[in-house]
Amino acid sequence: MTDTVTRLLQRQILPLDRDFDVMPLYVDPEEARLDADRYTIGGNRAAKDLNNAAIRQSTSVGNSIHPDQIESRTAFRVRSGERLSFGTYFNAFPASYWRRWTVVDDVTLTVEVQGGGATIIVYKSMAKGHSQRVSAATTEDDQPARFTFELPLKPFIDGGWYWYDVVAGDDDLVIGSAEWTAEVPADRAQHGTVDLVITTMNRPDYVAKLVGQIADTDELRPYLDQVMVMEQGTQLMRDSQFFPAAEKSLGDVLRVIEQGNLGGSGGYARGQLESVRKGTATYALMMDDDVVCEPEGIIRAVTFGDLAKRPTIVGGHMFNIYNRSQLHSFGEVVQPWRFWWQTRLDGYSQWDLGARNLRSARWLHKRADVDFNGWFSCLIPRLVLEQIGLSLPLFLKWDDSEFGLRAKEAGFPTVSFPGAAVWHVPWTDKNDALDWQSYFHQRNRFVAALLHSPYPNGGRMVRESLNHQIKHLVSMQYATVELRHRALEDVLAGPYALHGQLPTKLAEVNAFAKQFSDMQLEADRDVLPPVRREKPPKKGKDDAEIPGRLSQLVTAGLLPIRQLRPVRAMSRDFPETELPAMDATWYRLARYDSAVVSMNDGTSAALYRREPAHFRDLLKRTIEIHERFRREWPRLAAEYRAALGDITSPAAWEETFRPWTEPADE
């Protein structure tokens, strides 16, 4: 008989700072109101649209929790007569993930309470979201009591959670702790250790606070092999007022590495390389510098990785740092035909767990299998890095998704693990498809598709890229079109050019983009000319209406003809309209010869001007290069796939890092 030991899988936790905004992620005073089954709704489009709108509606009736009910990191006071659920993001037990990916077969829930006449009720859910009562226990008096529940994982093949509710009796009930444990093979008794890899550029306070948060978590310290901060800017963490305390607390565990700005992939690859070369940590954990971390999530990710059936990448979820109960995405995939990352089709993004709790959201109970996890928080076994290589040299964008696809093809799955999360600035507050980042989006997406697309010629990739170029052209976004065109030219240059471009490409892109008025941003609106038009809008119509699909198709067909007409004389000196970022769609912008358009982050605006000659030149070059990609895709794909092992190898990255790892010549 195999020897076993008891391991703690997950413990009950409460917010570190008693933050009221995150309380719904830890404890839930609301009832469960499960939404309709999508199979009951059927395939009717109108019915599905109505149901999707209904699903987003809040089920909260206003029940609240007072921060003073938090007695400690693990203890909570439930007031007399009240009912409370721990079926929440951080405290429900994600049974289906443990069932699918680990060696754990059964779990034990142990709850310690004090309070007379209280009831503890254990529930489980099925993949369809239905909850079932599993067991219950009642306290006899106000003496401390300890209850144990043995819970099998067998019924969770497709999805489902375990959790418990409590009902206080005549007295207040104090829940001292709750722990989920399991008997595991003796060779899995010891927990792994982690190299925490943080890449930063000119965010000294952000990263110093994050390192300080890590340093101040006593429970996490035994799991840390090293905390590596890759400094790639000129404003350094060591100059932050928050740094000395973090440095003192971490001591030799903290290592700060300074190098040139090689982007996220260059920073993470440096940490991956150092971790592999050092060889003492079980995992390397990629983490952004501008996050607020739930430290317990790191412990849970390590524990899950320790007990996985095979080496597994364990990712965390991302919550909105400005709306802290809002979950960005519960699991992301790369849609193979379009080759674009997205929330899985039967899931939702920007989901507010403060408005509709876990027990009321049917879709959250089906296990979400993913292709990758963003590197805002992602645990990678060192063995995986040793076997499949380090990050691709992409500067930013697609390095994490490409790595996940590469690992998956090599037999190493990625799990976006519930209960391991950070708070981060959401992507929805940016529009990086229009600024300098559009170059990296375009180039890196094509590189990733050449490496991993299962379809001939990349499926829809080339056609969609052409459509997007024309959309930007009719929107007077010439800088974006030029940058995306340059990106395609650099893809054609081949895989071995990527490393050499890392230190210089950002500066080149920024300098080139500044030539165009649509990339010349002004923080003061009054610097730009006022709006004037030769003629008022026809019949006083404005841009508020959103046209239907047929109208958009007709507009798209007519727009190229309009681009050949002369520019209205007054538009050369005065913008014809002013559009906020949210309304600056292609079908609106294409009506004008000039426009002032604000940026998504709300900090600046730019003047767009229609230039027919530039339009014709760019359209010609756009068609030519996309035709070339159609012809040369098979050759390019073979070239990139053959080079993948070389350009992601430690040896290749060591050469790229050489200017910062070897002393300069006298």
Image (cartoon, rainbow, N blue to C red):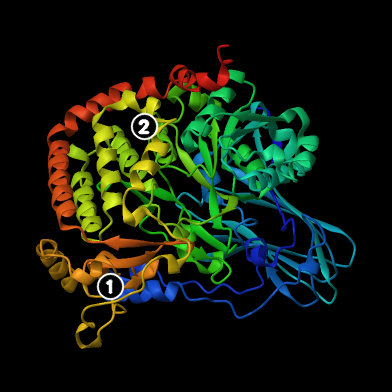
Q: Which mark is residue 409?
A: 2
How far from the left and from the top, in percent, is residue 642? 29, 22
Structural crowding at the residue carrying mark 1, measured as other residues with C-alpha within 10 Å and reported as few (<14), some (14–19) or many (≥20) = many
Left or right: residue 378 versus residue 9 is left
How far from the left and from the top, in percent, is residue 113? 81, 60
| Callout 1 amino acid | Glu
Q: Which residue matches tag 1? A: 576
Residue placed most toward the observer, 175 or 27: 27
Q: Residue at x 24, y 53 (%)?
A: 468
Q: Residue at x 55, y 57 (%)?
A: 319
Q: Residue at x 78, y 72 (%)?
A: 168
Residue 336 seen in render = no
The residue furthest right is 143
Q: Residue at x 43, y 20 (%)?
A: 649
Disc 2 secondary structure class: helix
Nearest-to-viewer mark from 2 and 1: 1
Quadrant in the picture for residue 38: bottom left
Residue 647 seen in render = yes
How far from the left and from the top, in percent, is residue 660? 55, 22
Disc 2 to disc 1, C-alpha distance:
52 Å
Disc 1 secondary structure class: loop
Q: Which mark is residue 185?
A: none
Structural crowding at the residue carrying mark 2, measured as other residues with C-alpha within 10 Å and reported as few (<14), some (14–19) or many (≥20) = few
Residue placed most toward the observer, 333 or 663: 663
Residue placed most toward the observer, 236 or 136: 236
Residue 306 drawn above or below residue 466: above
Residue 494 drawn above or below residue 564: above
Residue 252 drawn above or below residue 480: above
Quadrant containing the C terminus in the rendered view: top right
| Callout 2 amino acid | Glu
How far from the left and from the top, in percent, is residue 411? 41, 30
